[in-house]
Amino acid sequence: MDIRDFDKISPFIRMMRIKKATAMSGKWRDIDNVFTYIAQGCAEFVVDGNKYVCDVGDVIIIPPYKTHIVRSLGNDPLVQLIFHFDFFERPDSLLLKHQNVQESEENITISKQETILNGQVIIAPGVSGKRYERKRLYLSMYKEFNDTKEARSIMLKAYSTLLLITTLRDNLKGEETSTLKDQDITKSKSWMHIENAIAFIEAHYDYDNLSNAVISNAIGVTPNYLTRVFGDFLGISLHKYILNVKIEKAQQVLTIGKVNITEAAEITGFNSIHAFSKIFKTVVGMTPSEYLNYVAQKETILR
């Protein structure tokens, strides 16, 4: 990826997610570019045998088809602000193939390397004054992603282009100093409650009664409060976020190929296959059967 590429092309956003984990270790391989901003905690990324340690405010961009290991470091929960993007639009653009392949790590040679330029892994440091700006841009973009307003795709291109261009510039310049105060909104109590809610949803997405009341009771806040702050910060209702997580998990288990559609519905907490299929099509843009056909075609191409 070169910063000059943006004179001729613009990014197309395929998926966005806010991911929180108290302890994380796994291996993934994606079909698109993955932008990750570390909002809290610290993580180690291993790509092509190179190790990148990312702290709060750091950004890492991983190119398509790069198998990468992610491990959380330290005692703080790891919060990642993520979006997946391509440089071309296609009918299956909202599909996310993000599979934890759980491969052996014994033969990986790890060498410390801070930056790789010229279209490889991109690293940008979380310099003071820019952390809040990156976070603010991402959250604004996340609201737009979950909305259905006119010109949504244009707004997503604008937000993502700004995030990517500033990240690439910081990658080229390296560490900078700034006198701007880092106004970290994610250290507020409201944001902490959102993170706790997200973590609970990730751990209990298979509940068939995963409701606002259940989640708010588990994290120690009132349902009305949780509904309000979730909408204020993320621009999406709590109910819609829960459904998005459930369908994302369903995509993952269907992609692995060890379960059928009915089993995928049960695993993700749906009592009705009809409701599962309807919501799946609303979120993904195709039915579960069409998605399975798409996955099969992709696997054939990759072979």
Image (cartoon, grey):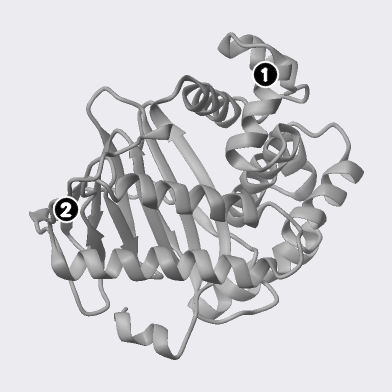
CA gap, disc 2 and disc 1: 41 Å
Q: Is residue 179 left or right of residue 59?
A: left
Q: Is residue 133 visible?
A: yes
Q: Position of residue 284 (x, y in %)?
A: 72, 58
Q: Position of residue 205 (x, y in %)?
A: 65, 30
Give the answer, above or below, for where 152 lies relative to 270.
Answer: below
Report which quarter residue 218 is drawn in. top right
Q: How many marks?
A: 2
Residue lying furthest bottom: 8
User: Which one is in front, 247 or 297?
Assistant: 247
Q: Position of residue 269 (x, y in %)?
A: 74, 31
Determine which residue is flagged by label 1. Answer: 225
Q: Amino acid at mark 1?
A: Tyr
Give the answer, above or below, for where 281 lies relative to 89.
Answer: above
In the image, what residue occupies the spot 55% across and 56% down?
Answer: 141
Q: Is residue 2 left or right of residue 152?
A: left
In the image, what residue occupies the spot 45% across and 91% down?
Answer: 8
- SS of the residue under disc 1: helix
Q: Amino acid at mark 2?
A: Lys
- SS of the residue under disc 2: strand
Residue lying furthest front: 179
Determine which residue is flagged by label 2. Answer: 51
Q: Is residue 256 left or right of residue 118?
A: right
User: Which one is in front, 241 or 204?
Assistant: 241
